[in-house]
Image (cartoon, rainbow, N blue to C red):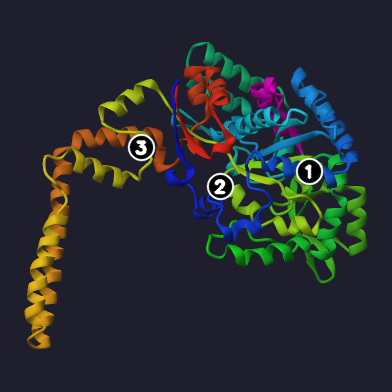
């Protein structure tokens, strides 16, 4: 199963901010702690060890044991939970929404990136333990982002009302989704496995958090993956001092706003609010807003004085939920974490947060861009060879690729650069004459040069267009196969669900990802299944 790699910078699918981060541009260095190299993890361990309380380890291990009590846990995962009590144990973490049936393919790539990095670090630092963590975004509320997945070009969707944190959402109504998915799957052992996995995940668990835990655990339990639900009373207790700081002093608002000018040349990912906390119940997730000396819960009649909201925080910390600005801080408070692995959008907002971590005296983790993958089949590879395409071609913008291949396939040279150079040389002689006469003649020469060069441009474009018509069949084949790899001109990993490939290739899909993905190499990996 051969693979090929393209650097993230050259793939054309990452923002300027992420490209500059990967290139370690000097203007961004104040926004992160250590750049992700294997050597820098030693420095990160030293720093994290100094300010991560051992009692937090005990609380974390106990909370995880409670979260897993109704699940079948592999020996590797069970041992990893126990290892968290050891001061020589650290986590590598990724997070993701509770997308239905994992949602897009990159859910797998995130988790495999985390698992493979823990293995790589263990080989270099054998005296330490490294535990892979998937942080479930159970307190998010944007149900429309997670209530579907795409299977073989068809959208499988769960229609339901949702108002509160999605992790608490009951799984009622997923029987209809299962029927639709089951009908699309067809026959075979892999199809039967996918049916059973969906059924046991979503029809045998009562809320979305438990369903997602079961699903991720089944896919990765042999790798020792630990799945964390932050919507947990004991874990929220650890965050009380930081939530109190937020309520009383709005520290994150001040610190992130101090950082934003450093990112002016880029599109700012997330703007902070004055208070970056939500108040949550099973069917409620609303912003806490400070107005007229009180803390109001947006879009409700609930309101607290300062003393009342601090009492509520102490007595019911689970009712307080960090938003996107504070969630990273919460995560790093409760985990002995060295590195956060995320997509380009996630890393963009993490780069806004370092000063807030410093103000709260919490170690800022290493930020690592997750692995990206393009999955292909042997048949598709053979087709690429016949069309004279390589993987770098496939990653080009479609218009540029078609123009390039039209020129390659044509019997003519569709490039009038030589003619333009010759024309310019002729006009140089005319300019010599014009400079010896009046300005009106000089203007006429310039106008004629512009007109004739423009005429050559027009002829070149018309020849290109004519050759596209002549080569239409071959070019349509190129468009077709590129659309297979980049549906709707977007990354495959953002559109397709893992089941699309699992139904044909089975467990080899995950095993080849575990074999091929190398998180610290910063390359877009092409894998032929």
Residue 89 visible in the picture: yes
User: Mark 3 = which residue?
Assistant: 394
State whether the magenta stretch is mostly helix, strand or loop: helix
Write down the region rendered in magenta: 206-229
CA distance for labels 1 and 3 = 43 Å
Label 1 vs 2, first from the N-terminus = 1
The quarter of the picture where the N terminus appears is top left
- Please, what secondary structure does the residue beneath circle 2 have? helix
* In the depicted structure, whether residue 355 falls above or below residue 108: below
Crowding near the residue tagged with mark 3, few <14, some 14–19, many ≥20 C-alpha atoms within 10 Å: some
Q: What's the distance in space between the residues labelled 1 and 2, CA to CA? A: 27 Å
Query: In this orientation, does residue 207 appear?
Result: no
171 or 193: nearer the viewer = 193
Q: Quadrant of the C terminus?
A: top left
Q: Which mark is residue 344?
A: 2
Which label belongs to residue 46? 1
| 1 or 3: tag closer to the N-terminus | 1
């Amino acid at each position: 199963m051969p693979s090929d790699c393209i650097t993230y910078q050259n793939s054309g699918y990452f923002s300027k901010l992420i490209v500059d981060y990967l290139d370690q541009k000097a203007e961004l260095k104040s926004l992160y702690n250590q750049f992700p190299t294997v050597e820098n993890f030693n420095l990160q361990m030293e720093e994290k060890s100094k300010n991560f309380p051992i009692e937090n380890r005990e609380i974390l291990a106990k909370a995880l044991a409670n979260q897993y009590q109704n699940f079948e846990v592999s020996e590797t995962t069970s041992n990893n939970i126990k290892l968290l009590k050891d001061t020589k144990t650290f986590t590598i973490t990724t997070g993701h929404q509770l997308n239905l049936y994992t949602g897009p393919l990159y859910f797998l790539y995130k988790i495999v990136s985390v698992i493979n990095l823990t293995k790589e670090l263990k080989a270099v630092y054998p005296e330490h333990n490294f535990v892979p963590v998937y942080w479930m975004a159970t307190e998010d509320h944007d149900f429309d982002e997670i209530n579907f997945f795409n299977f073989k070009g068809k959208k499988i969707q769960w229609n339901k009302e949702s108002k509160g944190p999605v992790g608490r959402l009951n799984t009622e109504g997923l029987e209809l989704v299962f029927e639709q998915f089951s009908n699309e799957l067809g026959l075979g052992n892999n199809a039967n496995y996918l049916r059973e996995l969906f059924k046991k995940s979503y029809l045998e668990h009562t809320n979305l958090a438990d369903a997602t835990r079961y699903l991720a655990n089944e896919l990765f339990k042999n790798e020792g993956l630990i799945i964390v639900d932050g919507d947990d009373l004991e874990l929220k207790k650890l965050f009380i001092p930081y939530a109190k700081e937020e309520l009383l002093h709005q520290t994150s608002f001040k610190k992130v706003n101090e950082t934003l000018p450093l990112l002016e040349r880029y599109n700012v990912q997330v703007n902070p609010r004055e208070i970056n906390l939500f108040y949550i119940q099973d069917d409620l997730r609303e912003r806490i807003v400070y107005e007229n000396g009180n803390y109001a819960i947006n879009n409700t009649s609930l309101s607290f004085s300062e003393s009342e909201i601090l009492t509520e925080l102490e007595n019911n910390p689970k009712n307080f939920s960090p938003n996107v600005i504070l969630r990273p801080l919460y995560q790093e408070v409760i985990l002995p974490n060295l590195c956060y692995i995320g997509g380009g959008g996630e890393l963009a907002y993490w780069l806004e947060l370092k000063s807030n971590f410093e103000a709260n005296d919490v170690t800022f983790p290493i930020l690592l861009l997750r692995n990206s993958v393009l999955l292909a089949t042997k048949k598709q590879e053979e087709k690429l060879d016949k069309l004279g395409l390589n993987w770098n071609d496939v990653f080009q913008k479609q218009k540029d690729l078609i123009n390039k291949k039209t020129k390659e396939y044509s019997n003519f040279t569709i490039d009038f650069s030589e003619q333009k150079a010759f024309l310019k040389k002729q006009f140089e002689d005319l300019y010599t004459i014009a400079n010896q006469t009046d300005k009106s003649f000089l203007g006429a020469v310039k106008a004629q040069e512009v007109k004739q060069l423009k005429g050559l441009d027009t002829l070149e474009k018309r020849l290109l267009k004519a050759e596209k018509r002549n080569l239409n069949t071959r070019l349509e084949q190129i468009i077709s196969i590129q659309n297979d790899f980049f549906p709707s001109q977007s990354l495959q990993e953002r559109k397709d669900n893992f089941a699309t490939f699992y139904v044909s290739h089975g467990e080899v899909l995950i095993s080849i990802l575990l074999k091929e993905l190398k998180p610290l190499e910063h390359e877009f990996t092409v894998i032929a299944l």
